[in-house]
């Protein structure tokens, strides 16, 4: 049904832990690129139950890496941030690593700034993580960009700037939601199958022969990214009106290729 396949995740996770005793599981949520999927809080509980079950063997070492690059545009209010509370008091052999990027939330693509946030129930482990990152950064790429760090600290230290920043992010979040709704409604109207969209910059359309479909759509000035198993449409990049029209055009092309 295009939703997160928890049974398959469990099978793969347990299989790897059995073989390796070590696992790094990377989940890009909320607002997955390219699918537009976000794990619900119930799905998060199931993912954590799988990790906790494996953590019962103290020899196992589990890292959950959560890529939240698009979090600032996900959900209504802070509903898509509630899952962070679930990372408290996990067993010591589960380490959570949050990958945060300023590229999206601060519209600072190219400034290469973000953060790696480590969460553990044991202070010693977070300290080890901190010093390991510090040394690895210094040795590999020196430091984060000063311009981006200054922007973030200047904004967060000044309540008026913080408010203006939050208002601006919210404006774009609402704009994105309206565009995505237009695309999802347009898809429903014309019967175009899409993966379940919950949040984010992109909607994915499962199909065969995506390269050919993309080539045909370019002739109509409609630009999509061809993926292995489908097409990615960037609702973040075009107007609401175009988001509403696009599904019918995509459907017509996909039907013509059948
Ligand atoms: C899923 C995902 N994770 C992380 C990033 C990180 O972006 P950056 O390297 O610009 O911080 C991106 C950017 O496109 C992304 O799509």
Image: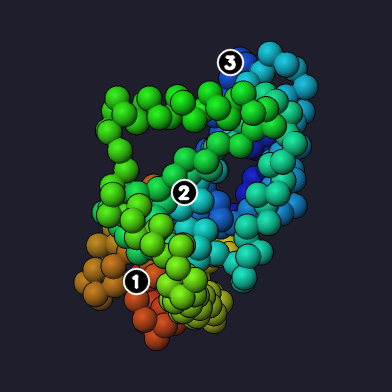
The answer as to whether callout 1 falls within 8 Å of ligand 1 is no
Residue 237 numbered tag? 1
x and y percentages locating residue 70 in the rendered image: 47, 58
Looking at the rendered structure, the secondary structure element under dot 2 is: strand
First along the sequence among labels 2 and 3: 3
First along the sequence among labels 3 and 1: 3
x and y percentages locating residue 51 in the rendered image: 70, 32
Q: Is 176 on the left or on the right of 226, as rendered? A: right
Number of numbered discs overlaid on the protein picture: 3
Looking at the rendered structure, the secondary structure element under dot 1 is: loop
Crowding around mark 2 (Cα neighbors within 10 Å: few <14, some 14 to 19, many 20+) is some
Q: Residue, x 62% and y 70% (percent of image)? A: 77
Q: Is 186 on the left or on the right of 63, as rendered? A: left
The residue tagged 2 is: 100
Judge by depth and name the residue closer to the eye, 98 or 36.
Answer: 98
The residue tagged 3 is: 20
Q: Is residue 25 visible?
A: yes
Judge by depth and name the residue closer to the eye, 46 or 10.
Answer: 46
Q: Nearer the viewer, mark 2 or mark 3?
A: 2
x and y percentages locating residue 109 in the rendered image: 30, 57
Q: Is residue 14 visible?
A: no
- Marks 1 and 2 close (CB-CB < 8 Å): no
Q: Nearer the viewer, mark 1 or mark 2?
A: 2
Q: Residue, x 28% and y 47% (percent of image)? A: 145
């Amino acid at each position: 049904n295009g939703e997160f396949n928890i049974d398959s995740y469990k099978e793969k996770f347990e299989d790897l832990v059995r073989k390796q005793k070590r696992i790094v599981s990377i989940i890009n949520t909320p607002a997955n690129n390219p699918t537009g999927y976000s794990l619900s809080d119930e799905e998060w509980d199931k993912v954590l139950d799988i990790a906790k079950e494996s953590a019962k063997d103290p020899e196992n070492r589990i890292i959950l890496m959560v890529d939240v690059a698009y979090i600032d545009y996900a959900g209504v209010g802070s509903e898509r941030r509630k899952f962070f509370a679930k990372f408290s008091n996990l067993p010591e052999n589960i380490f959570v690593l949050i990958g945060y990027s300023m590229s999206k939330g601060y519209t600072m693509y190219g400034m290469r700034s973000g953060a790696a946030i480590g969460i553990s129930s044991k202070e010693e482990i977070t300290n080890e993580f901190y010093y390991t990152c510090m040394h690895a950064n210094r040795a590999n790429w020196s430091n984060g960009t000063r311009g981006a760090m200054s922007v973030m600290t200047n904004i967060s230290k000044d309540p008026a700037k913080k408010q203006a920043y939050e208002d601006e992010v919210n404006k774009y979040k609402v704009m994105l939601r309206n565009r995505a709704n237009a695309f999802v409604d347009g898809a429903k109207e014309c019967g175009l199958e899409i993966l379940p969209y919950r949040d984010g910059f992109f909607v994915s359309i499962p199909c065969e022969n995506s390269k050919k479909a993309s080539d045909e759509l370019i002739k109509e000035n409609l630009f999509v990214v061809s993926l292995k198993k489908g097409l990615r449409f960037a609702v973040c990049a075009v107007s609401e009106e175009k988001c509403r029209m696009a599904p019918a055009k995509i459907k017509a092309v996909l039907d013509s290729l059948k």
